[in-house]
Image (cartoon, coloured by chain):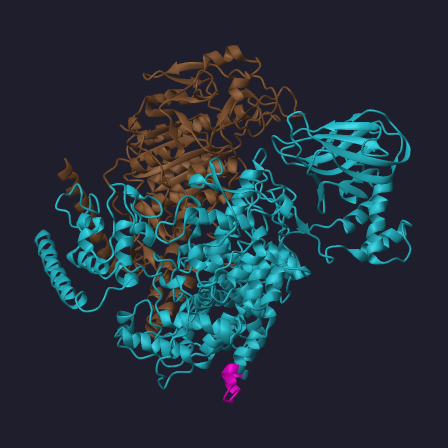
């Protein structure tokens, strides 16, 4: 068995060597893009073991993972604001009975809350639950479509984190550190695996819900990794990628003429100066031209057949989570390595209708239910689920205790942040489908079985993509950095 | 294929063996072992990951000599100087049993390495300091050659000779290349064609030197170098994290520009930024300079623990100070001892203590803030005050005082900071913070007309609060109202209190702060209101009064402020770097390894700053000159600007680095202009950057600098240059940040009403360093060209070359406008000759005439474009607003495309 894997790896490597040669031979014309260095100007570049390498490797070239893995790409859906596990997946019959009762002080001991103060009351689930599928997974009435798909899904109900404010917790979830400045998991993944599509960025971000996540663009930044690995935000409104549209006095033909002119002169200049960096620049201008064509193409969902639009609930030209789900499928189809979706608006404190479990929360559920189910089903029918990892979750959970905002209308019901228990789910390549991992106590306040820390979760995602989280390192400021810092245990039980 | 691979491997093995043997015979027998070049690299590579500052497996560490010479858990002496065979270290390296042999579970060390270590122990296990921890000295300048212009060239050529680099230095670049290079390096903006022609026509011997002096005296010099320093300062116009509200700290940027232009000594420049607030009789500039460390992030997110983020800011200040001035990665020691440099875990917190004594505390209002007299609109205040008959001609201070008095008497509320008397409170520009039970503030003759409601504006986090009692006549006088405060999640809220008795008329009012039932006495108090209305709002003043309030109540700049000695915080080590696990108490001190030639214990932040600028601080001058070098040549003498430690890159020219460092301190007397000039005067700098195939082969990365440096301009330079050659760059200096064009929909920050509103008039075309930087959503065009998001200090930008950059210059509005402006200018000058117009654009942009070939290519583009527009008139709609005539608009459009091609050229966005 081991031998086979080694053979396979060698074969893969050889394929890539051949491919590189092939592209190098083409490097004089359009098409020789990947041969040239995106990082040509970078004076030192470190390989994945932290050793400085010679320049003029394409940092985006697909590379062999640490070991063979089923997942080749990933779609990560983050519900920014932290959705309530109690109203979605973590069924707690006891909690209904406790509704309205005063919270015993013993429960509050040693707990830090963002907002809860004084003597709060317990809050029963604002949802009804049923079991679905062969796996008998519990899903609430808020996700009627999703209940169809539970046999594809692996729930982790025992997540916990260190952070209880949104921005630090989102940073922690995506960069392994609660402070700004570390690379996002998507940057790590493209750094480790490269990208399979030369005309599109390897790490693409799609945001919906009207706002970007609380922690801003730093949760898809490249931190200390070279900036080629940062997430590129694609948008449904305005330029799909910044600066990709022609200015008012140009069209594609004219732009083609301009780029040809630039590159002809650059080639003249190269002959005079011999600086290899000029060669890289030539390649980047060719790539820019290709992106101007391929990005709007892949981002245009209007040509999808009607049944697909029906399936996802998409409306071309609008910005929505459903559109982003469909885009995510189109992107992974094109070989994009990491697609990150953010959907904003889950911070259900009950301060107003938007943040009420009876208001905004229900709306959010409707926005995601059909679309994320369609995404799973669509990927499956195309055979893409076998090589794509799907992840869904928030940055922490919510309390079984009701939060009362001073001055808020009592009809609005909400819960505070709970870093000690929340639910995420995964599906697709390499994941044990129809399985539920971990357990919380009878009020979903603390994890009582199979705790999974954020770093464990990250280690598991990297593992599913064929990378060892302890070996995926970057040498910076005198030491090796990694996504999981010095922590992280792979959650073996969730692997298929 | 497979066979070939195998035989290849065997061949390599044999080759490696031959090399090993030859080194073995030539290397180890004659000379004694050098710790730094021979031993430390082995220890760092093979041993310290288990036996270092992080893990001390078996109780053994190879970071400090005394530890390496000690006994491990086994009870055996690790290294016995002079006696390799009695040293457990040596025994374990050569042990026959895998289970005992070190490195554990790894391959045995090479024979060569083992021999080096053996000989080293036998020679006494001498432990030398890493070079960077020994203060620099000038070594003798190597012999000059004919091309030497100053000592730099001698060192450069000597190093190449020493390393057997068989290349000759390049010839001097032509004058056009030189002036462009110099102008970009000193001012960040290319020269005008007039400056070029003056330089070409200046036949005097010192024409080159005059040129440098001229540019150094240009105010643009300060803008360029301040721009670079903003990365060090992690300067931004917002506070970071979720809310990411605007921060008013641009006066710090103004300070930087002025400091560079005045050629402030690097020592003063350093001390003012680290501790300007503590300098006796500090000037306004010195206080504003201390905003350097107020560029840390603030978390205004609801429910965030202020202390957690205050500590995060102090950690950031500690790390940044080392990153910027000492070039060592102190951040490592936040959690444990340094993995390979001799700095201990406690030493981090000893240094941390210098920054742990400031009064800022992650408060929403950014206290302490400094109000520059410039912030007060005296004239306006005076005019309004006159209009409402508040005062007649009085001094400025009287205007302010009277306005405050007015606010108190007629504004229907008592602003805490306007109090007449106070006890045991900290008062800053906006609010009052009680320090002790029974603390109070008082107002004399406050006007209290028949109120039925009482409100207070205050803010506090979780687990704070206090009782506020409002009394008349004295702190013990009759109680008229009281508050039991509640959490406001850091927002400033108006909360209603309980009226005990309503009184009228002018009374002395005492506001007394007492501990609440939980024993807390903490919060920020802004104002107290007495009125009849049911509205929970501050009383509404008429617009004139509001204007007056605004004029006397401007936005200040966050600066550093120190606690009184009696209020000092206790600093404790955070075990594993976590605020949750405090360890032993520590006292302020500097790392021992850097202090050996200074031997002082700085008591506070000011003394610490003086310690950094001490002549015998081993790193400050080296790190500083290395940064200038990197800015000018693209790569530092120590390539890892951020790490001069034993794991950082070795200096390419060690003697030159040290000579420059001492030269900077002694000969230049820390003048930054002088050291820049010295570098620019060298013939090394003046070389052409054309590279021969041979040179590319021998020295691909130009480590030896036998040719000029050639590298892409920074994000700031690319923008400024395009605007400058197009003639639309605004010369306006200083002031608040501006918002140039940015694509729509970039800013979508949560809970933040701020919007990107494109600046008007010339503010759209200011230099890049004035662009508003929002941390959670930085200006995208700068990010594309490797600008950091300013969340933390970044001492070295890594240059990349990506297709997003190409798209940026091709399609971003600012470059489209620059292309059109260039084309219009050229058409105005040469209305009858497109050839001349094209040549003119190229000349304006690159200061050279295009070669015939390049000119043909550009002409060809013009013709193609012109033909395209004949059929595609719809593309001319926008341009017709500028140039209504059909033919001319078509000309302008086609020529704009030529200009666009030129500003996208590699030679344009590169310093050659």
Residue interval drawn in magenta? B199-209
> Considering only vertical position in the picture, is A193 above or below A455?
below
> Considering only vertical position in the picture, is B611 above or below B662?
above
* Residue A412 percent across, percent down from the top left: 61, 22
Task: Identify the image quadrant of residue B726.
Answer: bottom right
Instruction: Say whether residue B288 is visible.
Output: no
Task: Give whichever of A208, A129 is nearer the camera.
Answer: A129
Extreme residue in the top direction: A97
Chain that appears brown: A
Within the magenta stretch, is there residue B226?
Answer: no
> Considering only vertical position in the picture, is B137 above or below A95?
below
Q: Colour of chain B?
A: cyan
Which quarter of the figure is the N terminus of chain A placed in?
top left
Give the mark count. 0
Extreme residue in the bottom direction: B204
Which quarter of the figure is the C terminus of chain A placed in?
top left
Task: Give whichever of B613, B154 is nearer the camera.
Answer: B613
């Amino acid at each position: 068995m081991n031998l086979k894997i080694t053979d396979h790896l060698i074969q893969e490597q050889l394929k890539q060597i051949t491919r590189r040669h092939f592209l190098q031979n083409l490097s004089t014309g359009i098409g020789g893009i990947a041969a040239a260095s995106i990082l040509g100007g970078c004076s030192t570049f470190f390989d994945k073991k932290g050793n400085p390498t010679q320049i003029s490797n394409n940092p985006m070239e697909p590379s062999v993972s640490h070991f063979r893995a089923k997942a080749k790409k990933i779609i990560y859906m983050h519900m920014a604001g932290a959705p309530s596990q109690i109203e979605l997946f973590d069924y707690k019959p006891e909690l209904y009975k406790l509704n309205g009762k005063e919270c015993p002080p013993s429960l509050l001991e040693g707990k830090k809350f963002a907002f809860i103060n004084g003597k709060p009351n317990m809050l029963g689930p604002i949802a009804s639950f049923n079991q679905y599928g062969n796996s008998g997974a519990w899903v609430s009435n808020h996700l009627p479509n999703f209940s169809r798909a539970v046999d594809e899904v692996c729930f982790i109900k025992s997540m916990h984190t260190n952070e209880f404010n949104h921005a630090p917790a989102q940073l922690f979830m995506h960069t392994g550190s609660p402070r700004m400045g570390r690379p996002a998991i998507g940057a790590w993944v493209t750094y480790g695996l490269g990208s399979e599509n030369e005309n599109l960025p390897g790490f693409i971000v799609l945001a919906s819900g009207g706002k970007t996540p609380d922690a801003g663009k730093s949760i898809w930044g490249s931190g200390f990794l070279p900036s080629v690995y940062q997430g590129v935000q694609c948008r449904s409104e305005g330029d799909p990628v910044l600066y990709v549209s022609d200015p008012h006095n140009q069209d594609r033909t004219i732009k083609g003429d301009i780029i040809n002119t630039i590159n002809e002169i650059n080639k003249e200049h190269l002959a005079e100066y011999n600086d290899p960096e000029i060669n890289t620049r030539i390649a980047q201008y060719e790539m820019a031209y290709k992106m101007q064509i391929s990005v709007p193409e892949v981002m245009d969902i209007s040509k999808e057949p009607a049944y697909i639009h029906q399936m996802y609930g998409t409306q071309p030209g609008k910005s929505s989570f459903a559109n982003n789900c469909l885009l995510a499928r189109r992107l992974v189809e094109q070989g994009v390595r990491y697609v990150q979706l953010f959907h904003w608006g889950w911070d259900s404190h009950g301060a107003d209708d938007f943040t009420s479990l009876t208001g905004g929360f229900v709306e959010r559920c409707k926005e995601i239910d059909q679309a994320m189910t369609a995404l799973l089903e669509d990927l499956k029918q195309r055979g893409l689920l076998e090589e794509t990892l799907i992840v869904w979750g928030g940055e922490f959970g919510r309390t079984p205790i009701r939060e009362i905002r001073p001055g808020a209308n009592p009809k609005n019901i909400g819960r505070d942040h709970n870093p000690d228990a929340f639910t995420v789910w995964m599906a697709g390549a390499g994941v044990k489908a129809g399985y539920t991992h971990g357990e919380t106590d009878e009020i979903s306040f603390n994890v009582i079985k199979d705790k999974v820390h954020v770093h464990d979760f990250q280690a598991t995602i990297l593992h599913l993509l064929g990378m060892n989280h302890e070996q995926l390192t970057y040498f910076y400021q005198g030491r090796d950095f990694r996504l999981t810092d010095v922590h992280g245990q792979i959650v073996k039980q969730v692997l298929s | 294929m497979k066979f070939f691979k195998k035989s290849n491997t065997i061949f390599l093995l044999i080759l490696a063996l031959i090399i090993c043997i030859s080194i073995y015979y030539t290397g180890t027998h004659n000379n004694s072992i050098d710790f730094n070049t021979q031993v430390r690299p082995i220890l760092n590579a093979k041993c310290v990951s288990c036996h270092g500052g992080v893990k001390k497996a078996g109780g053994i560490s190879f970071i400090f000599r005394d530890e390496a010479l000690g006994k491990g858990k086994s009870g055996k002496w690790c290294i016995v100087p002079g006696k390799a065979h009695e040293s457990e270290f040596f025994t374990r390296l050569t042990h026959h049993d895998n289970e005992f042999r070190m490195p554990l579970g790894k391959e045995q060390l090479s024979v060569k390495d083992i021999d080096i270590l053996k000989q080293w122990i036998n020679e006494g296990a001498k432990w030398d300091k890493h070079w960077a921890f020994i203060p620099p000295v000038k070594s003798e300048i190597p012999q000059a050659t004919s091309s030497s212009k100053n000592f730099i060239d001698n060192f450069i050529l000597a190093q190449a000779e020493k390393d057997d680099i068989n290349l000759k230095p390049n010839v001097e670049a032509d004058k056009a290349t030189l002036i462009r290079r110099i102008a970009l390096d000193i001012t960040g903006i290319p020269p005008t064609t007039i400056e070029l022609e003056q330089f070409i026509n200046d036949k005097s011997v010192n024409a080159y030197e005059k040129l440098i002096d001229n540019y150094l005296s240009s105010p643009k010099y300060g803008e360029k170098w301040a721009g670079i320093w903003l990365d060090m300062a992690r300067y931004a116009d917002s506070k970071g994290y979720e809310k990411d509200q605007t921060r008013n700290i641009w006066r710090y940027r103004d300070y930087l520009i002025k400091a560079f232009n005045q050629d402030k000594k690097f020592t003063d420049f350093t001390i003012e930024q680290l501790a300007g607030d503590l300098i006796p009789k500090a000037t306004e500039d010195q206080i504003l300079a201390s905003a350097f460390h107020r560029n840390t992030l603030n978390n205004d997110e609801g429910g965030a623990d202020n202390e957690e983020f205050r500590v995060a800011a102090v950690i950031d200040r500690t790390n940044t100070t080392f990153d910027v001035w000492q070039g060592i990665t102190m951040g490592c020691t936040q959690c444990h001892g340094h993995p390979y440099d001799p700095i201990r875990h406690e030493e981090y917190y000893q240094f941390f203590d210098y920054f742990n004594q400031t009064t800022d505390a992650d408060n929403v209002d950014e206290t302490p803030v400094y109000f520059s007299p410039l912030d007060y609109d005296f004239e306006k205040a005076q005019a309004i005050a006159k209009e409402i008959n508040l005062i007649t001609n009085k001094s400025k201070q009287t205007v302010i005082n009277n306005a405050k008095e007015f606010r108190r008497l007629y504004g229907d509320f008592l602003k805490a900071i306007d109090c007449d008397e106070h006890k045991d409170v900290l008062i800053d520009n906006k609010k009052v913070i009680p320090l002790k039970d029974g603390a109070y503030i008082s107002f004399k003759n406050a006007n209290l007309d028949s109120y039925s409601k009482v409100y207070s504006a205050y803010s506090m986090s979780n687990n704070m609060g206090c009782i506020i009692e409002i009394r008349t006549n004295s702190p013990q006088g009759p109680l008229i109202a009281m508050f039991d405060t509640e959490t406001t999640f850091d927002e400033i809220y108006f909360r209603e209190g309980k009226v005990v008795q309503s009184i009228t008329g002018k009374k002395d009012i005492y506001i007394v702060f007492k501990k609440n039932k939980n024993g807390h006495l903490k919060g920020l108090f802004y104002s107290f209101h007495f009125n009849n209305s049911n509205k929970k709002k501050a009383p509404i003043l008429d617009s004139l009064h509001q204007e007056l309030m605004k004029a006397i109540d401007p936005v200040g700049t966050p600066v550093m402020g120190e606690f009184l000695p009696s209020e000092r915080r206790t600093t404790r080590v955070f075990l594993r770097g976590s605020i949750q696990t405090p360890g032993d108490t520590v006292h302020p001190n500097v790392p021992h390894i850097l202090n050996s030639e200074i031997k002082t214990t700085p008591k506070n932040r000011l003394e610490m700053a003086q310690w950094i600028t001490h002549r015998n601080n081993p790193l400050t001058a080296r790190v500083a000159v290395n940064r200038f070098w990197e800015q000018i040549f693209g790569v530092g003498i120590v390539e890892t600007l951020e790490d001069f430690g034993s794991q950082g890159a070795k200096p390419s020219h060690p003697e030159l680095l040290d000579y420059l460092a001492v030269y900077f301190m002694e000969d230049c007397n820390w003048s930054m202009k002088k050291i820049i000039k010295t570098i620019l005067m060298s013939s090394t700098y003046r070389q052409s950057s054309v590279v021969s195939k041979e040179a590319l082969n021998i020295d691909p990365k130009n480590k030896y600098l036998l040719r000029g440096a050639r590298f892409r301009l920074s994000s700031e330079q690319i923008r400024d240059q395009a605007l400058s050659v197009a003639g639309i760059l605004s010369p306006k200096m200083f002031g608040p940040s501006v918002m140039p064009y940015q694509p729509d929909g970039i800013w979508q920050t949560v809970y933040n009403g701020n919007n990107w509103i494109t600046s008007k008039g010339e503010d759209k075309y200011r230099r890049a360093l004035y662009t508003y930087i929002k941390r959670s959503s930085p200006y995208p065009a700068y990010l594309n060209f490797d600008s950091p998001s300013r969340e933390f200090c970044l001492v070295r930008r890594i240059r990349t070359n990506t297709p997003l950059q190409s798209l940026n210059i091709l399609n971003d509005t600012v470059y489209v406008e620059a292309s059109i402006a260039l084309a219009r200018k050229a058409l105005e000058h040469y209305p009858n000759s497109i050839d001349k117009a094209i040549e003119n654009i190229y000349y304006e942009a690159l200061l050279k005439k295009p070669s015939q070939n390049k000119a043909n290519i550009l002409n060809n583009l013009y013709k193609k474009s012109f033909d395209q527009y004949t059929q595609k008139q719809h593309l001319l709609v926008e341009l017709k607003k500028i140039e209504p005539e059909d033919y001319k608009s078509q000309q302008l459009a086609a020529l704009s495309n030529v200009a666009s091609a030129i500003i996208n050229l590699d030679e344009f966005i590169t310093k050659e």
